[in-house]
Image: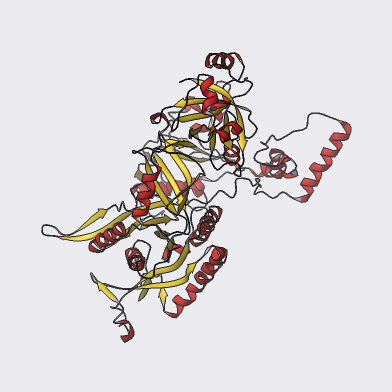
Amino acid sequence: MEKKVVKLKTHPITFSEEEVIVNIDLLAKDKFVLKDGDIIEVLPVEGQGLGRTTAAMDQSNASGPGAGEDREDKPRLVLQVKQLPSDIQVKGGPLSIISSLAQAFSLSNVREVSVQKVDKESVKLDLIELVFKDQALTRSDMWRFTCSLIGSCVHVLKKLEFAGIRAQVDRLWTMGGNTQSGVILDSSRVLFRSASAQVFLFIQISTEMWEFDLNGDMYFDKAVNLLKELFQQWKEKSCNHKVNVIFFWRVYYDSRKEALPSSLVRTVIQKKGRMYQDYYKVITEKSSALDWLHLVLEIKRHFIQLPEFFKKKNITSDPGSVKKLSASTQGNVLEAINLALNVFNRDHIDVNFLLTGHQVILITAGVGVFEVDHELSRITKERAIDQGTCVDLLCLTEQPLHAVPLFMFRRESECSGEEEHFYIPHWINYSFYSPPNRHSKSLYRPILKLSDHLVNHYLKQSKEKKKKKKVGQTKLFIPASIVSSADPLVRVDYEEYDSKVFRNAKAMEKTFTMTPVVRKRIKSQNAPFSSSYRETSGVKFQVAGDSTDEGEEEMDPFASDQNGEDGQPASAANGIRIKRSKRRHSKDASHSGASSLRARFHSTSETEKGEGCGGGR
């Protein structure tokens, strides 16, 4: 495609509401022919004069260092040429762009741009996301709006209007990635997102809500942080949703231990031998953007009051209690979704012309696995799809390794009786919340708390070192990214400190060895057992300074390894040495099993072997 460098101008909206003004006649004189409906691509060009050819541009880009980087970094702008009155074309120059668009694409300070005529197929868009607010649109309105956009150029933040419907371009996708501008064709998909929808926010109260995650945060605190981030994002995008917040939980009853009162007989549901009752508590109804910050405080206040409510109703989480709060897996999730679908099913009555769209958000402390009824899950799926309701599941735990969300239900089988089945509800969008790392910018603090005199002694030495300018002090090098270099605790020589503390303990060290030996059968008159094998599983326990029993003949298969060539002791791999003071014992005491450590080890080994259980034991 032929390119041309032209002079760029910007015009305010008071001069013309058109995004681009192209002087077709002036460009035609320079043999750059454009007509009404053509698609052009505008790119900034640095350091190039007016009217240069494409060959000159390519040669300049190849010769100059770093040339062509602006072409890759700057987002490309795709515009559509329109035939305008001649007086407007002359005043606009060769090319003029509206000021707001030039500022969005960083073209306000650019005086020369490269204009290239492109094909529609090369710049087509795959997906277009439009956002609208404070309007009630039907599916037919969205279809007519989409048909009116075919063949037109759009860019991010462009405002569109058709038959009184106002929308704004939020994001664009092409070739599997985001882009800033493009052309809408018949194959492009247009997605409408409402910034003023009716939202039901359900928070599941289960036994996991009072538990803690791996980072030590309670799951309800994570839910509060999630709501803060969600409301903050809605505020940044100027959303005006009407939010309804509801707590829901399920309580199981054990009628075998205590008879149910007459007031609960009609409300308790019995299914498959288990009795339960579902609870719903409305926190707020149709809360607007002005009340979202106050809404977080209301949610925390009602959650703090829940333990007192459970105490009055005798509801606990103990397995043996009569009234037990269910876990997230056994909760009433589908019942809560149908509660919102009942409201959405009557939206044609008393219509609110400022709201469009229905959304259900479920916040749970589980992993996305629920025990449900098969028939109820089928009905819920049909109702949600028919009404066009978006169901989002937000889990506060870590994502499991299996597929989620996952529904479990039991069905009767003729062959094997009751079987357990699993089902993945594809009509539910799920995500796992991970709070931002609060400790990423914090400094490391050592757990060891050193005494004040040690720190003062180190500071005193450091001052003397600066005065005398001596070199050779021991330093501990710690990365600056982990700790602060100004902290005096991190510069202490811990090895020197430990050697001073444990210096006096060396005098009290003891020696203890374990040496592999092989023993023969012996006979001793003073032994408590006359004839037996005295073996200790190939290991001999010997106290330093003690002599072996008479009549024993020791054969050490590792004798060559016990001492090195220079007579030094062998390595610790051949024996475990624990230092202790030398102490001698008599042979009689050794056989009596009262005071000799070796005799105690021998008697213990014989007991383990089950041999020679004489009167000495």
Instruction: Give the x, y percent position of residue 357.
Output: 40, 58
On the picture, is 230 further left or further right than 406?
right
Marker count (numbered): 0
Q: Name the residue: 88% across, 34% down.
A: 467
The answer to which image quadrant residue 546 occupies is top right
The picture quadrant where one finds residue 255 is: bottom left
Q: Residue at x 74, y 33 (%)?
A: 474
User: 9 or 243: nearer the eye?
Assistant: 9
Q: Quadrant of the N terminus?
A: top left
- The type of colouring in the image is secondary structure
Q: Is residue 107 visible to us here?
A: no
Is residue 440 placed above or below 478 in the rendered structure? Answer: below
Return the x and y of residue 423 as percentages of the image width and height.
Answer: 26, 53
Q: Nearer the viewer, residue 582 or 396?
A: 396
Image x and y of residue 590, in percent: 49, 47
Q: Is residue 282 above or below residue 34?
A: below
Pick the residue in front: 503 or 224. 224
Name the side, left or right, on which 555 lies relative to 55: left
* Residue 453 shows in this picture: yes
In this view, the residue in front, 176 or 169, is 169
Q: Quadrant of the C terminus?
A: bottom left
